[in-house]
Amino acid sequence: MGPLPKRKLSRRRKRNRRAHDALSVKHLVRCDNCNAYKPAHEVCPECGVYKGEVVFEIEEATD
Ligand SMILES: [Zn+2]
């Protein structure tokens, strides 16, 4: 027998465990480009740069 769980997890137990998953806050890091806090592994919402590349241009608000 391999290292497998002895019993199938019941729906109740699985859902009970998953109930807390959404509570964790995303890990925030400083943007390399503009130094603003942004979620890790995501495009910076302030300057649109990810891994040193401009993914989208920030449009200036014009009236
Ligand atoms: Zn940025």
Image (spheres, rainbow, N blue to C red):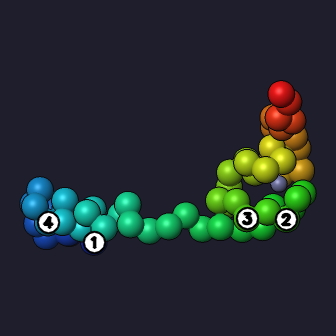
Residue named by callout 1: 3
Q: Amino acid at mark 4?
A: Arg
Q: Quadrant of residue 24?
A: bottom left
- What is the distance, in whole Å, between disc 3 and disc 1 at their CAs? 41 Å
Which amino acid type corresponds to the residue marked 3 in the rendered image? Tyr
* One can see residue 44 in this view: yes
Give the residue drawn at x 73%, y 48%. Answer: 45
Residue 39 appears left or right of 47: left
Q: Quadrant of ligand 1?
A: bottom right
Q: Earlier in the sequence, mark 3 or mark 4?
A: 4
Front one among 9 and 52:
52
User: Which residue lies under the disc numbered 4?
Assistant: 13
Distance between the alpha carbons at the discs numbered 2 and 4: 42 Å
Mark 2, ligand 1, within 8 Å: the answer is: yes
Nearest to N terminus: mark 4 or mark 1: 1
Instruction: Please tell me which residue is depicted at 27% across the width and 62% down the height of the picture.
Output: 18
Residue 4 visible here: no
Question: Left of 46 or right of it: where is 22?
Answer: left
- Residue under label 2: 35
Q: CA distance from mark 2 to mark 3?
A: 7 Å
**Mark nearer the viewer, 3 or 4:** 3
Quadrant where the C terminus lies?
top right
Quarter of the view holding residue 8:
bottom left
Of labels 2 and 1, the one closer to you: 2
